[in-house]
């Protein structure tokens, strides 16, 4: 009689039937993440290479041609055209056909020969900051290197020899960077959407109202509705990990089981968000809109694409309230850095606290806004 | 023996001074009524008058702000779970799962009420028999017509053999034949001692109830058998009578009739006028007045007030009371 979870079995079974009947939705929500994986894993490369460049070589002698060759060999610049005047140089950039314009003045070689500094103009289209940054860095480096080569003949005589070494992702592969983070976003997507929809659908149909008049306990009802989607979320995680490892060849350095364990509080947080959304939305269309709300901060403030360090100071604390922040650190930590629970327990704890808080808020709101409305 | 006698005496529902407030708004204001076992209790009132709130209070979904209620002998304040165990509820939109078959819907509710497999099997057979759902067992809920959806919903609500069923506008949006069949079924079941708490907007359905109550802006303004309500002094004030006037051009006739002294109130009913007049009102005066305006009265006959008359009269009276209180 006092079974707190009464009705759990019945609701769970029914929910499983819904999922099976609506195989299309299930298939779609499972394949969407894979599609995104392919897009982010294969199509997007954060390493900027082969920037379209236009060159105006007014000098034309050996030194100037050698300099342009240095640009070409850097792999950063791809000279698509040589022009003969300033106007064409500018035009190519304005038209967006080239992002960088290099102008070597007519006296470049002369100045070098006379031991003066030869100036080179590098025009950079600033409308894409990451491309511009890369162009500045590489062109400056080429200039420095060229100067040093002329002053110091012997490389061994360099006073400071900086040797940067990339850990964990030595080849700067994009899939290694994107896919662990994508895992977090995709899980959020699938679980939040599916739970919100499954509850709002019953709200729309009036079956929820019906269930409240039966001896089903709220806990049994919510858990019965959540667990099937928790299972789907978990399956999704396995699917993503499988593709990540064997299709995108991202090495998993840490323990997969730890990752699975730590995904549980994250999934609970995501499912609670789904309940929260369903307590607000009265139609599936409304739920659709609301379900995007947690996605945006999870993409932009969690460090998934943009480093958290770039978030303005006022918004920075917000990133601590986003479950994805912790889970992305966990996925990257385990997959790329081989981190263990010793390194990640704070993230795990934060997720548990966030998950518990969200579930409590969601359950309370559900009680007040749905059951007693 | 004593307990059995007591349980026989105990009404299906007894509500005493029910109050429910939402913030400053009083949705249910001092509502008291009793529903005896085996009654078909019609609970009527305009939309937003508090019908659903009362149902939610009686089924233990909404805490009471004041008063007390016992349902099937259980206190809804303290035993709401046990109450829900013993009642059935069918909402106006026949809350079924459209992507589940008829059989799956029934099984689901059986599990919800924790029926053991043998009892579930027996009850499902009985329900299918009673509601004629046999040919549709494997059909999806979405593929049923309105009448069949309603039968299935009723079946789901009755699976656990409740002695009291709440039906919230059970006939909204279904065809007249299905409506008639549902009422036949309700009478049959009530003959077996099942109590029904039915809300409806159809006056002909209200007339079929053995007991009706009318709620208006949170106040219960009528409670009794349909016949006893017709004789209420507010409905049939002392020294008045009701007549039905049949005439062509009813709207014009109504406008004229309202100005004739001795006619207290008049409304159109189809092709005729229902009027409340002084007991000694001279019907010939009315005939002559109308003839002068070119309207030849076809027939005038005395009339017993319908339930609709009852509710209209009571609503007017309480509206003016509310307005007076507002000033």
Image (spheres, rainbow, N blue to C red):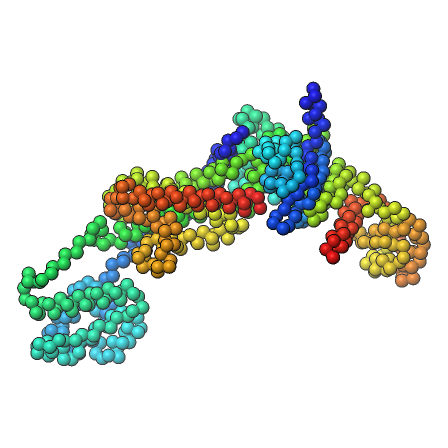
Rendered image quadrant of residue B87? top right
Q: Is residue A224 above or below residue A100?
A: above
The residue sitting at 83% across, 42% down in the picture is B231
The C terminus of chain B lies in quadrant: bottom right
Instruction: Give coordinates of residue B267: x percent, y percent.
Output: 81, 54
| Residue name at image x 13 percent, y 72 percent | A65
The percent position of residue A334, horizontal first and vertical second, equals 27, 44
A33 or B125: nearer the eye?
A: A33
Q: Residue at x 16, y 75 (%)?
A: A119
Above-or-below relation of A15 to A121: above
Q: Residue A51: x, y in percent? A: 24, 65
Query: Is residue A179 rendered to the left or right of residue A233?
Result: left
Image quarter where the N terminus of chain B lies is: top right
The reply, left or right, for residue B323 in relation to residue A295 is: right
Left or right of A35 on screen, residue B112: right
Q: Residue at x 38, y 48 (%)?
A: A323
Look at the picture and state if B94 lies above or below B261: above
Residue A26 visible in the shown view: no
Up-down: is A305 above or below B196?
below
Asked if residue A218 can be seen in this view, the reply is yes
Question: How many marks are shown on the rendered structure?
Answer: 0
Instruction: Give A217 or A251, whichever is nearer the viewer.
Output: A217
Query: Residue B107: percent from the left, percent from the top?
Result: 54, 32
Q: Is residue A75 left or right of residue B259?
A: left
The answer to which quarter of the image holds residue B17 is top right
Hey, which quadrant is residue A40 in on the image? bottom left
Which of the two residues, B213 or B306, is positioned nearer the viewer here?
A: B213
């Amino acid at each position: 009689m006092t079974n707190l979870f009464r009705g759990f079995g019945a609701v769970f079974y029914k929910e499983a039937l819904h999922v099976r009947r609506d195989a299309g939705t299930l298939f779609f929500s499972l394949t969407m993440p894979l599609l995104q994986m392919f897009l982010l894993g294969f199509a997007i490369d954060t390493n900027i290479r082969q920037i379209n460049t236009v060159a105006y070589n007014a000098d034309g002698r050996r030194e100037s041609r050698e300099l342009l060759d240095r640009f070409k060999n850097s792999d950063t610049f791809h000279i698509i055209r040589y022009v003969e005047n300033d106007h064409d140089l500018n035009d190519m950039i304005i038209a967006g056909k080239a992002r960088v314009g290099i102008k070597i003045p007519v006296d470049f070689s002369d100045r070098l020969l006379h031991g003066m500094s030869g100036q080179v103009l590098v025009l950079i289209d600033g409308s894409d900051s990451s491309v511009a940054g890369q162009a500045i860095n590489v062109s400056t480096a080429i200039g420095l290197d060229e100067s040093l080569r002329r002053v110091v003949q012997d490389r061994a005589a360099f006073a400071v020899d900086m040797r940067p070494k990339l850990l964990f992702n030595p080849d700067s592969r994009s899939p290694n960077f994107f896919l662990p983070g994508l895992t977090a976003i995709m899980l959020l997507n699938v679980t939040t959407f599916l739970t919100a929809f499954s509850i709002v659908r019953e709200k729309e149909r009036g079956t929820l109202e019906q269930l409240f008049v039966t001896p089903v306990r709220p806990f049994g009802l919510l858990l019965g509705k959540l667990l099937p989607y928790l299972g789907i979320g978990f399956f999704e995680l396995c699917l993503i990990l499988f593709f990540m490892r064997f299709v995108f060849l991202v090495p998993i350095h840490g323990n997969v089981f730890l990752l699975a364990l730590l995904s549980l509080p994250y999934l609970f947080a995501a499912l609670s968000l789904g309940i929260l959304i369903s307590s607000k939305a009265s139609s599936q269309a409304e739920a659709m809109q609301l379900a995007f709300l947690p996605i945006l901060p999870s993409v932009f403030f969690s460090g998934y694409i943009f480093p958290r360090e770039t978030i303005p100071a006022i918004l920075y604390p917000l990133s601590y309230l986003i479950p994805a922040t912790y889970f992305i650190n966990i996925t990257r930590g385990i997959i790329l850095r081989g981190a263990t629970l010793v390194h990640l327990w704070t993230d795990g704890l934060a997720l548990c606290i966030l998950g518990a808080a969200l579930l409590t808020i969601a359950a309370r709101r559900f009680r007040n806004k749905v059951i007693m409305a | 023996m004593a307990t059995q006698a007591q349980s026989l005496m105990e009404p299906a529902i007894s509500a005493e001074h029910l109050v429910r407030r939402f913030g400053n708004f009083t949705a249910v204001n001092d509502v008291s009524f009793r529903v005896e076992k085996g009654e078909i209790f019609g609970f009527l009132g305009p939309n937003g008058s508090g019908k659903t709130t009362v149902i939610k209070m009686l089924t233990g979904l909404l805490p009471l702000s004041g008063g007390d209620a016992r349902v099937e002998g259980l206190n809804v304040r303290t035993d709401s779970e046990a109450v829900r165990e013993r009642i059935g509820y069918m909402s106006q939109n026949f809350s079924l799962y459209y992507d589940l078959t008829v059989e799956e819907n029934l099984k689901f509710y059986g599990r919800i009420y924790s029926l053991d497999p043998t009892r579930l099997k027996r009850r499902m057979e009985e329900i299918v028999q009673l509601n004629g759902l046999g040919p549709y067992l494997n059909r999806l809920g979405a593929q049923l017509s309105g009448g069949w959806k309603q039968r299935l919903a009723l079946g789901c609500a009755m699976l656990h053999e409740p002695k009291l069923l709440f039906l919230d506008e059970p006939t909204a949006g279904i065809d007249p034949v299905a409506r008639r069949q549902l009422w036949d079924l309700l009478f049959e079941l009530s003959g077996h001692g099942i109590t029904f708490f039915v809300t409806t907007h159809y006056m002909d359905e209200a007339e079929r109830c053995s007991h009706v109550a009318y709620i208006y802006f949170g106040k219960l303004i009528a409670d009794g058998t349909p016949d006893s309500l017709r004789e209420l002094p507010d409905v049939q004030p002392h020294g008045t009578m009701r007549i039905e006037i049949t005439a062509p051009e009813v709207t014009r006739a109504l406008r004229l009739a309202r100005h004739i002294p001795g006619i207290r109130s008049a409304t159109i009913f189809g092709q005729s006028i229902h009027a409340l007049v002084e007991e000694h009102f001279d019907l010939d005066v009315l005939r002559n007045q109308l003839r002068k305006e070119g309207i030849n009265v076809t027939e005038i006959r005395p009339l017993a007030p319908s339930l609709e008359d009852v509710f209209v009269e009571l609503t007017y009276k309480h509206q003016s009371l509310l307005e007076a209180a507002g000033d």
